[in-house]
Amino acid sequence: MSNQNNQYNVCPKVVPANKKSTIAIKPPFSFYAFKPDRQYEIVHYPVDYSERNGRDEKNCTFTAYPKDGILYVELYFEGEQEHIIYVNDITGGGKREIGVFSIYSLEKDLYNRRPYKGDMHMHTYYSDGLDSPAYVAASCRKVGLDFMAITDHGKYEPSIEAQQAYQGVDIDLRIFRGEEVHPPRNPLHIVNFGGSFSVNEMFEKDRDTYIREVADIEREIAGEVRQEPERYQLASAIWCFDKIRQGGGLGIFCHPFWRIHNGYYISTLLTEYLYEKQPYDALELIGGYHRHELDSNILQVASYHEQRAKGRKIPIVGVTDAHGCDTGELFGWYYTIVFSPSLKFEDLRDSIKDFYSVAVEAVPGERKVAHGEFRLVKYALFLLREVLPQHDEICLNEGNLMIEYIKDNNDAKKQLEKLKGGVDSLYSSYWTQL
Ligand SMILES: [Zn+2]
Ligand SMILES: [Zn+2]
């Protein structure tokens, strides 16, 4: 439901499925306190509600008891779904609606994870972007991200510079390493997210080994892939993705339907082979396209669903591929929500590989859209409406202070460290069982 009364604080907002949970509805000011001499009713509708299940308004209605101005109600949350909770004042036989609230119940695997927002494909002035790595990192926090990586074309160093810029301060944004990998004579773009070394550097420093190892892979796949140049391109991609994994990183297949000049940047045949062999760890389902290029995202989503219908499981991410933070374009428009046990890199990487992510479009002035598996999209739509706006507000404050910090404002460090743990405590209030 819409936050019709979002000044009320409802805790928890996310509960375990198939269990009773107690929900507390806290008024924002004492003026709105729930009073012991008044009578309140709760009407509970699970959204998967169906009259055929024998539910009617009567057996969805419960009495709630105020204590110290807070209303408590114990409800049974069946299955994994959203629940709409109406709170009415029914004193003296009347009925006055106080608020409509929303709760989500989750199966254990998802309940034990938290949603973390990230962008793992962005550029700085070390390649063709506009801003410094430190500024991109702060701007990521401003737009509500929990983690990020700089991935300049052919360069790994800028991602390290972003980490180093904040070494002297304890912040919540997680800054990871990365690069966009451009193997020789191969048009394919690959993102190395979080790998512990540069893959670009490997074929730049030792071209001979690269050529020899890719030729070996070419021979291995020759039976299945007869066409050139796709055979070489695929072999080179397999080599790059293997190296990324050796460094513990996540290898991302970038923007398959990016149009450059008059065609897609790689052949449809290569895209087909990549889907088939799946040498990558994650697909850029939502890529950094400008408004006039949005067809490319639509095609990526359609082809992803087509591949899934063929029985393939495909890990996904959403990224901005932004080349500037303040251009009014791309930056902050797209991101990935990863449902992960923690913000540790390994947890994020493995959660994406285990299909616990959705790709989000959040183009200004337009409705936010989540893409991916049905179960996660359904949950993500709830989070985008009920949880993430508060999360983003906390991040905005911290991001502004991060910008002050890199401007050498001495006070910023102290203030940032005071705000530390803000998202964590928001999440623990929304997930904690009373
Ligand atoms: Zn690219
Ligand atoms: Zn890029």
Image (spheres, helix red, strand yellow):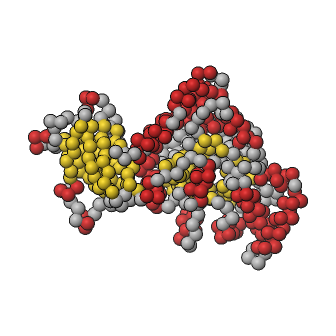
Q: In this view, does 386 lie above or below 254?
A: above
Q: In this view, does 141 lie to the left or right of 107?
A: right
Q: Which one is nearer the viewer's eye here, 427 or 4?
A: 427
- Residue 337 spot, x, y in % from top left: 53, 50
| Picture mark count | 0
Q: In which quarter of the image is the C terminus?
A: top left
Front-most of residues 140 and 368: 140
Rendered residue at 45%/47% (across/down):
384
Work out which residue is located at the far bottom of the displayed protein and give it. Answer: 223
For this orientation, the residue located farthest to the right is 208
Give the percent coordinates (x, y) of residue 258: 66, 56
Which residue is the extreme one toward the top?
410
- Corner quadrant of residue 279: bottom right
Q: Where is residue 10 in the image (x, y as percent from the top left)?
A: 34, 42
Residue 285 seen in render: no
Q: Is residue 138 at all visible to an observer of this figure?
A: yes
Q: As drawn, is 105 to the left or to the right of 177? A: left
Along the line of sight, the residue nearer the viewer: 42 or 262: 42
User: Between residues 296 and 404, which one lies in front from this camera angle?
Assistant: 404
User: Residue 354 in the image: x percent, y percent?
Assistant: 56, 60
* Residue 90 drawn above or below residue 108: above
Residue ID at (18%, 36%):
36
What residue sits 75% from the left and 45% below the top?
Answer: 156
The residue that appears at 76% across and 73% down in the rendered structure is: 221
Q: Which residue lies furthest to the left in this view?
A: 92
Q: Quadrant of residue 212?
A: bottom right
Q: Is residue 46 left or right of residue 175?
A: left
